[in-house]
Structures are given as structure tokens and as C-alpha cells.
Image (spheres, rainbow, N blue to C red):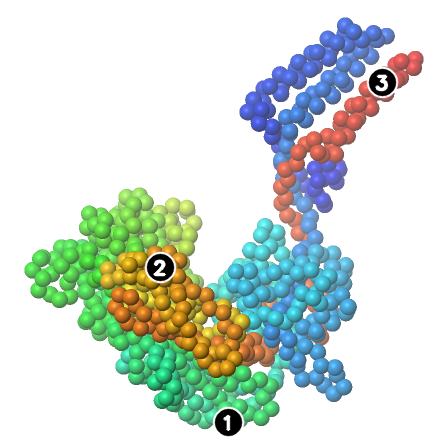
Amino acid sequence: MTKCLGWLLGFQRLRSLDSIDVTLAASWANEHWWTVFGACVVAIGGTFAFYRRYENCKSKTLRTTLSVVRAMMLCLVLVTLAAPVIHSSATVLRSPLVYVIFDDSESMGHVDTPGSGTIPLSRTQEVLRLFGNTGSNLLEQLEQSRDCRIETLRVTDDKAVSLMKIDRHALESALTSSGRATPLLAALAAIPKHARSERVAAAIVLSDFIDTTDAGFSEELKVAVRSADVPIYTIGVGSTSITDVAVLIRSEAKVRLGKPTTVTVELQHSGLDGEAVSVSLQSRSLQFVAEAASQGPRTVDERTVTLDATTVKYTVSYEPESSGQIELIATVSPLSGEAIRDNNVATQQIGVIEDFLRVDYVDFEPNWEWRFIKEVFARDDLVGRDGFRTFLASSSANVRLENELFHTELALPRSEFYVNDVLFIGDGPREMFTPEFCDFAEEFVRNFGGGLVVIAGPRFGPQELADTPLGKMLPVRSDTPGHQRDDGEFTLQLTKEATLYPFMRLAESEAENLAAWKNLGTLSWYQPVNGVHEQTQVLAEHPTDVCDDGVTNQPLIAIRPYGKGQVVYLGFNEMWRIRKRYGDRYYQRFWSQVTHRLGMSHAVGAEKRFVAEFDRPAYNVGDEAIFSVEAFNDDYEPLGLSQLSDGSLIGELTMPNASGVETCKVSIPTTRPGQFEMPIRFEYAGRYTLRVADPVGGQIYERNCQVSEPAIERRQVIRDAELQKQLASTTGGRSYDLSGVDHMVREIALGPTLEREQRQVALWCTPAWFLLIVGLMLCEWTVRKLAYLR
């Protein structure tokens, strides 16, 4: 019976029918269903009347039978005109869906050293030898032996679409080892998005597991991959040990002029245990190309390093001598027998600022948090006493005029307001936040990438910001009037997302970090909210109290992006309690890291008025860059047509060509008010320099980028066996080498799954409807024939 129902309703391998409902799709019938019922009544009555008066039948039973059959046929025709639709929900047994994901990056084109008498094959060719149509075709074996459905995909270097479906019968033409990057981890995290509503039973990944996005298998990616709920069976391709040494360099993206910063140099090697290599670190200014070329790079550090571990790290203290863009260059001397030498040089650009971060703190009245933050920033290297200013609504006019730390008014002139880098807003009544100030703050975060910190206090709370431009930027929703919740003491609870944010890590070790947060002690109150914004990351929460949805814990510390900037929210203003026993040690680290994150993510101070940059610092030949300029006048309003040349900015581009170097004038057109963009196609390797003049101040801004021949994929060709094993163990799968694929086919855990499936089918298109009408017609014809033959 169940199998028959499944066939009638279009379900395959039906296990149970959960619900069924019928509606009328025709507008006239849906809106006036009684017309269908009335028409059927008329049809039935008319049929019986006709047969009773005009049909000359031998018996009353025969006449009644023919009347019933004909009436049913007419009713079915009328109902068919009403377009009935059957809505059904059922539980069906589905064959497991298996994703087979191929790495198609350039590193898969690498030929590992073959043994004697062996024909050298690239890694992709090794894969095709087993999975291609001309080889063993293990895909077909897996499909037949395990009764599963297989979908083949490849990892692309497109950030928007990291997984692309390919024809399993044309793998030889689809896999070309041409990808210039391998966002492998991001692609695996995107499996549910690609599968949409269908459940993926397992994913088989064939790769050398070299993720070139430099993201690493972070906690965030671990959570994303694990939450996909798909066991990953990893098949490693390529050698795990070749003779090679690579150098990497890491440092802060922005540093202060005259302040030492730490540069980390990392050496990764294979097959060179105990070897000594020479490593040099140099710096080169990118601001003044001609002067830099005559002086050459400056040597920062030179040393001999013994490769006594697989990864060797050391730090160098570096103090920039000039502001602007600086390029750091780490070089390791090449050794004989190295498989790759493209990875012996690493570069990184850093921005050196000679200015300070500007922090503006707005509050209604002084409180302990305001007092301690003021002192913290006075001692901060990036802010200092020159960078901190405040406005207290309750302060007297004399204090605002005589104390240089105080602003005289809340809404400063545009030329002063937008110079700020981070804006703090404390506890205050709604009438304190004027419309002009709210509009300035919203534009400051949205268009200029400024940082906003909102600290809720016990007197007013975030409810005062509802229905204002400030309120719509908050990471939390606080739409209804309320008051502080102080009905019991509690201990702040960190979320797993807190580990992803440096300002939430108060110490290097996990144990010390937890001890530092525990030092905050118990809190007696906080400001409750209705919920959180969909883009919000909650970093600390109440252990028991929840929002209106009954699920989300009340947020105490949260962050969200808004436009080009970010907004941090604290549901209490008692972070100062963390100073207990340790003074400013953890307190200063917290607020300094918050300010660093929010203030250093964009141009600093007045530099926000004219920002020119390439979308990346380095490219490969054949890439296309976007050079963009954000240009405003002294009041931080978009430049007018009178300040432009035919609506564009004029620049000068110096670039390499076939015969050397050429310089040409370029026009950078406007895309929207204050925004200018120009694409640049890179045909040759070398340094590209673009100079553009600020039409307001007359200053020449110079920006550079480096274009290289070798792709990043060629810098690392050793299979990352550790990542391969981590992916498998994290998701509940298994890890194999290419030689163990036969074991994977036998051991992969697959089984049919019960899934809920819904269907909407036009009833007159179903086999049941067809059989009913044909059956009635055949029944009438048979009755008539039998009756008249007698």
C-alpha cells in the first residue's frame, strides 16, 4: 500500500506519508470555492434529470448506475478546471550523497621525484589514473558497491564560489592544475551552502592540503567545518618530504614611527635537519622610489640559523626610520638540491604612522570607567595625552573651556569630528544625543571606517539610543523601554568566539587568560536587551538570562561590522573591576587592543580625508588590480566638480614594459560621490607606482605594488599531512594516502537516510487522476454495451 501511494504521489522509496492536503489553484475557484461545489451540484442534478426523462432504459437500476457514473465524470471535469493541487509531505529513504572534491590548484601540477624506471606524473595525473574514465574509475566502483549518489566538484580560486560542480565523465578536461590559490578550508566550510537543502553523507577530498589563504586551521574554521556535519575522508596526494626551505615573515599591519615593533621570521624546511642557513631581514621605503633606489634596502638583521626543527621561528626588533609604506624583505640563502627556490624570499608591507590615534569619549557624567579609561589612554603608546579628548554633558562650562581634555560642545565641526579614530559613547539620556551628533557618528563609522564603542551604564542604558542613527549601529536590539537587571550576582561567561578576537585574550596562555577574566569577579547588574543583530558576534554573555527569543543568552560584550567600521558593545561599565590585584595590567591590554582594532583598521586622523590604495599589495602577471581613491574636502564632504578635471582625478602611472619602464598619465573616474576607481591590468612583472595629487591640499600621494611571475602555489609543494589528518579527525572521517584508496572504498561509512520530502503536484497530472477518469469512462462504456447487447 505504501509503495502504491508513493507511486501515485511521485515519491520514490516512500516510508511513510505524513500529511496530505488539496487546494484549488485557479483564482476563480480559490476565491469562490462554493462555485465549484454549486457547479457540481448542478451537474449531478442535471445528469439525473436527463437520464430520468430522456434515457430509455430497461430497468431503474441501470438508469441510476449510468447517471452516477456520468455525474462523477462531469464533476471530475469541473474540478479539473479548478486546477486542484495536492500538497503532500512524506518520509522517504534516500541513497547517500557523496561529494568528491578535487584540488585543482597549480601545486597539483607539481611532479614529485619519481623512482627509478618510473614515468614521472604530476599529482593531478596520479589522481586521474585512479579516478578518471581512462583509469581505474573508482567513482563507478564506489557508486555501485555502496549504493550512493556521487557529485564531483573542484576547489576554485574564486572567493565568491569556492566549489564548482564538474562533469564526472570529463575529469581529464576539467582538472587542469590552473588554480592560483587554494582556499581549501573555506571551500569545505561552504559544503552546506553548496548542497542547499540536501544532506551530504560524506565528502572525499583529494588534495595536497596546502591551503594558500594563510588562514590556517583556526578555531573559527574548525567550528565552521565541524558545523557542516559532513564526515571528510581525506586522500593525500604528493610527497611529505622533499629537500626545501621556505621563509615567512609576519608583523603588525600598522606601527607608530619611533616605536619598536616585533617582526617574526619563520623558516619551514624539509629534509634539511641540522643544516645552517643564512637569513637576512631588510627594509625598503615605498614612499620615495627614486631615493630608495639610490640608497638601496636597509639591512635590519643578518644571522645564521640552524634548522634543528621542522619550523624555526625567531623575532627581530625593528624601529621604522620614516613614515609611510615600508616593505620588509626576508631572504634565506638557497641550498643545493632544493626542490623550489621561489619561497626563499618573503615580503610584507607595513604602514608606519607618525601621528597618534584620536579617541573621543562622550558621557553624561564622570564614572569609574571613564576615569580609568582616561588614565589608560594617557599612557598608551598609540594614543597618549594628545590623542584623548572627552565631552561630559554634566560638566560645567568653565571646565570645558579651561581643561584641554574637554570638548566645549558635543557635535564638533565636521573638520574636527571626522579626524577622530575611535568614538566612545557612555551612559546618557536620549536628549543628550542631538540629531546632528547622531548623524555625524553614523557617517563616521559607515563611510570613514571609524570605530565605535558603546558602554551601557546603570542609569540610562542602550534603550535611550533606540530609534536613533546610533541605535541602528548597535550589535544588540533594545527596542523596548527597560532598566538595569540587578536581581542577582553573576559571573561573566566567555563564548567560543571570544578566542578569535585579540582584545578578549588578556594573556598569552589560556590558563592565565581565564584567570584574568575570573579576576573581574561577580557583577551585580547589567543592561538587558531584546536580542542581537544577525551580524553580531557575542564574545561574553550572561550565564543564565536569555533574550526575548528564549534561546540567546543576554550579551555582555559583542561586536559587529557596520559599513566600513566596527561597533563594540558592553552591557555594563564595570570593566575597571578587573584591575583588582593586578592594577592596569589586563585592563590596559583590553582597552588598548580594542582601540588598536577599531582605530588601526582604517586611515588614521586627517589621513581619512584622502585615501589612495591598491586593493592588494602584491599580484601575479595577468591579474587585474583596482586602484581606488576616497577624496573629500576639508569638511570631509565629497569633492565637487570644480575641484576635479572632467569629474576625474589625474594621476601618473610608472610601470614596467617589454623594453624597460614607462610612465603615462591616467585618469581616475568617479564611481560615486567621493569615490574614484581605476582598473589596472598587469602584463609584466615588476614594481608599479601610481602618483595622484590631492586637489585640495596639493600633496602628492604615491602608492606601489609588486607584480611577480611565480604564483604562490609554487612556494609550497610539500603535502600538509598534519592538516589532512586534522580535517579527517575533526569531522569524524578518515585519512588515507593515494595508495590506500581501495581501503577507503570499503571503509567509508555510508547508509541510506530518512529524509522529509514535500511535493506540490497538480492533481489532474497524477496517475491516480488519469486512472479515475479513464476508469469511469470505461465503466460507462462497459455497462452500456452489456445492457444493449442483451
Q: Amino acid at mark 1?
A: Ala
- In the drawing, does residue 223 fall left or right of residue 763? left
**Label total for image:** 3
Work out whether residue 522 or residue 410 is closer to the camera in this orientation and state it: 410
- On the image, which quarter does residue 421 sit in? bottom left
- Height in image: 307 above or below 150? below
Give the spatial CA distance, label 3 vs label 1.
Answer: 103 Å
- Height in image: 297 above or below 738? below
Q: Disc 1 or 2, which lies upstream in sequence?
A: 1
Q: Disc 2 or 3, which lies upstream in sequence?
A: 2
- Height in image: 636 above or below 354? above
Coordinates of residue 683 in the picture (x, y in percent): 52, 74
Give the spatial CA distance, label 2 vs label 3.
Answer: 87 Å
Coordinates of residue 493 in the picture (x, y in percent): 37, 60
Q: Amino acid at mark 2?
A: Gly
Identified at 38% across, 45% down, the residue is 548
Identified at 78% across, 7% down, the residue is 54
Q: Disc 3 or 1, which lies upstream in sequence?
A: 1
Q: Which residue is mark 2?
A: 647
- Height in image: 27 above or below 660? above
- In the drawing, does residue 264 fall left or right of residue 200? left
Work out whether residue 776 or residue 356 is closer to the camera in this orientation and state it: 356
Q: Quadrant of the N terminus?
A: top right
Identified at 8% across, 64% down, the residue is 402
Estimate how packed mark 3 is, as few (under 14), some (14 to 19) or many (20 or more) residues with alpha carbons within 10 Å.
Answer: some
Q: Which mark is residue 783?
A: 3
Q: Which residue is mark 1?
A: 276
Q: Is residue 33 visible?
A: yes
Q: Is residue 234 visible?
A: no
Coordinates of residue 581 in the picture (x, y in percent): 25, 72
Estimate how packed mark 2 is, as few (under 14), some (14 to 19) or many (20 or more) residues with alpha carbons within 10 Å.
Answer: some
